[in-house]
């Protein structure tokens, strides 16, 4: 059995976070002994699972939804994971685009980045919606090794 302080040290999670997770029903409430919370080794696993879900990008509300769906239908959690995969994939796409733009800015031969044709094209693409009659223009892509 662990006190909340021992659980905190063992997991690296502050006691205030553990209490918060209990209030949100993300962790099973600890048994009490002498007015102190007492946790079993299962609490280590619960904390690990919560941290893993957070590392995967789930919000506390989404984690609660995962827990609820797991309890009612052990396969429904897959819907939430599929939705999170779509969100993460879109975030990665945006981050990769940002990285490519920044890499180009650092490697660009133009002293004034606003004079770079590729930068200007990127600005033009972001300056507003493209009319339905305008031809499609793709964003320039810079390789990690140099200029495009």
Image (tube, grey):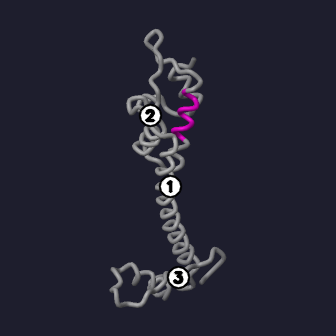
Q: Residue 75's spot in the image, x, y percent?
A: 52, 44
Q: Residue 25's spot in the image, x, y percent?
A: 41, 31
SS of the residue under disc 3: loop
For label 1, the residue is 82
Q: Earlier in the sequence, mark 2 or mark 3?
A: 2
Work out how far the residue at label 3 is from the one at label 1, CA to CA, in angstroms. 30 Å
Q: Earlier in the sequence, mark 3 or mark 1?
A: 1
Tag 1 near tag 2, CB within 8 Å: no
Q: Is 44 a magenta residue?
A: yes
Q: Who's the residue at 49% across and 60% down the image? A: 86
For label 2, the residue is 26
Compare residues 1 and 121 and report the one nearer the observer. Answer: 1
Instruction: Residue lying at the far top in this picture: please name it.
Output: 34
- Residue 13 left/right relative to 131: right
Residue bounds of the magenta highlight: 43-51
Quadrant of the rendered structure where residue 125 is? bottom left
Tag 2 near tag 3, CB within 8 Å: no
- Looking at the image, is mark 1 or mark 2 nearer the viewer? 1
Instruction: Residue lying at the far right in this picture: please name it.
Output: 145
Image vertical order of residue 134 relative to residue 108, above or below: below
């Amino acid at each position: 059995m662990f006190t909340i302080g021992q659980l905190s040290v063992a997991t690296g999670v502050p006691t205030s976070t553990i209490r918060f997770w209990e209030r949100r029903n993300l962790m099973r409430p600890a048994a009490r002994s002498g007015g102190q919370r007492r946790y079993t080794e299962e609490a280590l696993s619960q904390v690990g699972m919560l941290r893993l879900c957070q590392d995967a990008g789930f919000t506390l509300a989404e984690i609660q939804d995962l827990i609820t769906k797991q309890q009612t239908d052990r396969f429904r959690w897959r819907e939430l994971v599929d939705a999170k995969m779509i969100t993460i994939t879109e975030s990665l796409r945006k981050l990769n685009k940002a990285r490519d733009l920044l890499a180009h800015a650092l490697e660009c031969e133009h002293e004034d980045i606003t004079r770079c044709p590729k930068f200007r094209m990127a600005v033009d693409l972001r300056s507003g919606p493209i009319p339905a009659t305008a031809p499609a223009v793709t964003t320039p892509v810079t390789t990690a090794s140099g200029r495009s």
